[in-house]
Amino acid sequence: MLPPPIDPRTLPDLIERMKEMVPYYTPDWRFSPNDPDPGTALFYLFADMYLQNIDRLNRVPVKNMIAFLNLLDVKRLTARPAQGYVTFHLSVGTPQPVLIPKGTEVAAEGEDGGKVVFQTQETMLATPARITDAVLVSTRQDKIVRIIDSLQDGEPIALFDVTQGVNEQSHALYIGHRDLLLIEGAAEIQLQFFNSKEPYRQQNSGEWFADPARVEWRYLTEDGWQLFDEVRGDGNQLWLSKKGSVPFALTDLNGEANRWLQARLLPIDDPSGTHPLLIDGLRLKTQSLNEQRNGGFAPDVLFANDAQADAEGCFPFGEFLAPYSLFYIASDEAFSKHDSIVEMSFNLKTFHRQLMPVEQPEVEWKLIMKESDIPKPAKIYLASIRSVVWEYWNGKSWARLMNGTEQEELFYRPTLEGLDVTVRFRCPNDFSETFVNGHYKRFLRVRVQSVDNLYTPNPIHLAPWLEKISLKYRYEPDRSFPAQKVLGDNNMQWTDGTPALTANPPRVFTPFAPIDGGHPALYMGFDEAPLKGPLHLYFSFQQQNGMEQNRPILEWEYLRQDGDRIEWATLKTVDETLDFTRSGTVQFVGPSDMVRKTLFRRDQYWLRVVNRDNLYDSTKPDLKRPILQALRPNTVRVIQQETLRDETPKQVRVSDTEVEYRLQNAPVFSEEVWVDETGHVTERELEDLMKSGVRTDAVRDGGGYLLRLWVLWKPIDHLEDSGPQERCYRIDRTVGHIQFGDGRHGKALPEGGADRIRVHSNKIVGSRGNVPSGAIHRLQRSIAFVQGVINPEPTAGGSDTEPLAKALRRGPQTVRHRDRAVTAQDYEWLARTAYPDLAKVKCFAGYNGEMEPDNGSVTLAVLPLNGGPGLPFFPQLRRQIADYLVERSATVVATAGRVEVIEPAYLEINVFAELVVKSMESVVPAEREAVEKLDKFLDPFTGNYDGTGWEIGQQIHPSVLYGLLKSVDGVNHVQKLSMSVYLVTDGQKRELRTEEAVNLPHGIVINGRHQIVVDLL
């Protein structure tokens, strides 16, 4: 508060006083300001000079106050530089990382059209490696969610929240066998599971796999996966029944062409502890089935010599017999079951066939005839197949399948009535496919070896007729086979269990493996190895109150090659995000032993962030997780400053004893002052200076003789505290004025004045440096392979030099708190010191960031000028103020991290009102004026009754709006008024009841949308 004026009188006050005095001192003269005369003019000359004296007198308290504050070394706050982040984009095909040195200058175009220069604050190596995949993983919830598409689309993502997105996790066991699973019709598959080292694990494995609530069994067809019709288990055995006619398909799975079974683990609510099964052996066998479970299916194709035959009825060797006739029977399903018992069943009968009809001789009958006179009929011969040979193709030639007499003479003189015949044989291991009549299949053939009476006159051919030909196969009880291929698909990663199960001795294989690590994690995949460093990854998080109070334990790891092993190793980082509780960069040096590996179906180089304390591995809906808005590599912090080098300041004598050196450009953010001490420092003194850490710049000739010596002097707050040989100076960065010591307090300058001084300074432009996102887009100097640069977020923190009026209000408070935060009022004033452009600030002692009572906590709600919901640069502002306050807080508060800075809870006020006006001409103007008055009154910065805005925690009642709207020109009365309040915080918006808004001590009124209806009286 400024001191009151000593003399508050103004010109009207002097005129009134003159009117009072004239009748007593000059009764003959009438003083009339409205009709001035020479006397009146003389009065006005006197009044003008008198008011100037009053003004000077009234400024005395302020000048005294300024002098007092100067005596206490209370200074105006200098301008602050804006800060932010910029992303460097490399050209496509950049072969190597590109060095971005500290101090690299980039520029934006200011609102006035001028150039605003920024400099990188750290050295960065821009890597051509791109983040091409990002995955969230939860072991406890057994979920894997890919988030790279959402990141690339700019959608906010709650990290470690696997309830969002599509769960791509699957646990499946795939069993492949080309021959045993070559099944077209109904069949039963028997599986056996073994664990020789821990036999107890195999005792109930069959029941475990048969549980329909746990495992789903399917087989792969041309149309996709089909469920088995029946699954049952007993002990370590499992039976899978297929009753349909859809065949298994030969399909490529993970690069392996085979016929496949799938055991898919079904998702459950609590997946922990559901993967206990370990096996070191797996065997299977199959048998054909039909609905009566006694087997039988038709062959694939039949050929009688070259003609295709029908399994329902056919002449296998034709209607007329001939040696070497061939009957082909094809069945890939039956004849692929090596070492199985194959049964071929059919009904065998015969049909009599003759090539030429037999004519009976004519008999001339007489009453009495001799027997010799009666012609005898020709002898009838029966041509029948004496023997056949059963053969199969073994890959090289046709080989004999059966040697038994019964099978060889099976077709010898079959009966007319028919006979049910079953032919059994053991399927050879070398039964192979071959071409027969354009069909490539497994064929069994029956070759006629000999035919009786074939060459007799016109014999009757006993042609075999086969009906209802069917096949079935089975294995003996003790016979089974190992799977040709066993694959596990767990955690979006294929594992081949075949080597483990076929080793000698066998090794344990886990069909359903849990997620590696046991902790929730964020995985990031790069298309090439991010090597060398320092590399920067910028994480932009949505601002949430209370995040730092529940800071998780996060560890960074990378995938490396260690001999024959691939393992996760710790990655050393510099984490500005404080474990993902705020926006910032994570810096690291890419290790040289990074290895490419396929994870989550992507072959890439991988980093991961592991939540070791499992804080985020929870399904609680109210758990706050970091909400990632963007992930940007090659992003580095920049500060708004422009470096001016080798400036010689202007020497100005301010008094007989004081000399100042003034820089041309102000305000100054930082500087280096070098003094030429050539001839004033000996070699030994120079050596002592270098040992003490003082920076020097010595120029020598070829013989080593010192030609020139520059010494860096250091800034100090008060020259009175320095000794006579101390190289120091005092600077007022607001105006760029430098003072040096006089030889008693601080070392005096060598003779030569300003010519012996050179200054490297960083010039800033204050609030002009607060530029919107995308404004920084130009490099001051081109860099090879750097295509462009841009700031993805607005820069913030820039402020102009503090006005004198504000400094006078702040000065007494500075004297009171002495730069230490003790009371709530101290915290508020120190927050304004940390960021002068704060419009509103309020301290809540004993409350945490969630605005819950918490002894020992201090929370400040702050609102910068022109701020509002979703302020993009608030995380940087919050960090700047919080760090400043922590340094000045009591140890018990600062060390516990209990100082928090939050945004206020924005109370959006929406008004609906019905106004009644007196005349029709007032309808439109009244509506417009009502909206304007509401917008102005509810503005958080310039609204309220006095135009100073709304304070944090100040409430509003609907009753005040009645008077506001009643004051609108032309309004007779307010017919109806309602006010709705919406809470806007943490990026969310919800409606509040009026009494709920009262319970928000950190709420601040902001403008909403208003609806005004105007009716005529």
Image (tube, rainbow, N blue to C red):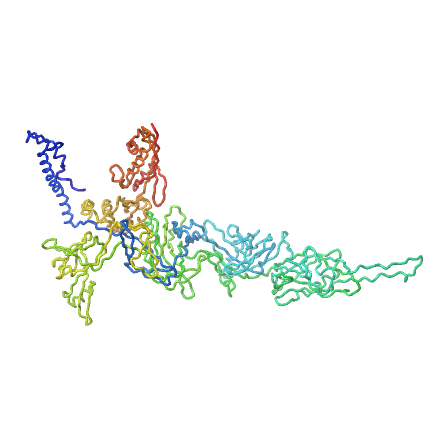
Picture coordinates of residue 241 (x, y %)?
A: 58, 53
Give the answer, above or below, for where 894 lies relative to 755. Answer: above
Q: Is residue 248 visible?
A: yes
Picture coordinates of residue 839 (x, y %)?
A: 26, 44
Quarter of the figure with residue 867: top left
Q: Is residue 897 visible?
A: no
Picture coordinates of residue 539 (x, y %)?
A: 35, 53
Furthest residue to the top? 1017
Give the answer, above or below, for where 724 lies relative to 111. Answer: below
Instruction: Specify the quadrant that holds the C terminus.
Output: top left
Picture coordinates of residue 418 (x, y %)?
A: 73, 56
- Total numbered circles: 0
Residue at 37% across / 41% down in the picture?
Answer: 990
Residue at 10% across / 55% down in the picture?
Answer: 657
The answer to which of 845 and 770 lies nearer the viewer is 770
The answer to which of 167 and 895 lies nearer the viewer is 167
Quarter of the figure with residue 439: bottom right
Furthest residue to the bottom? 703
Image-based side of 129 in relation to 285, left or right = left
Instruction: Specify the quadrant that holds the N terminus.
Output: top left
The answer to which of 731 and 613 lies nearer the viewer is 731
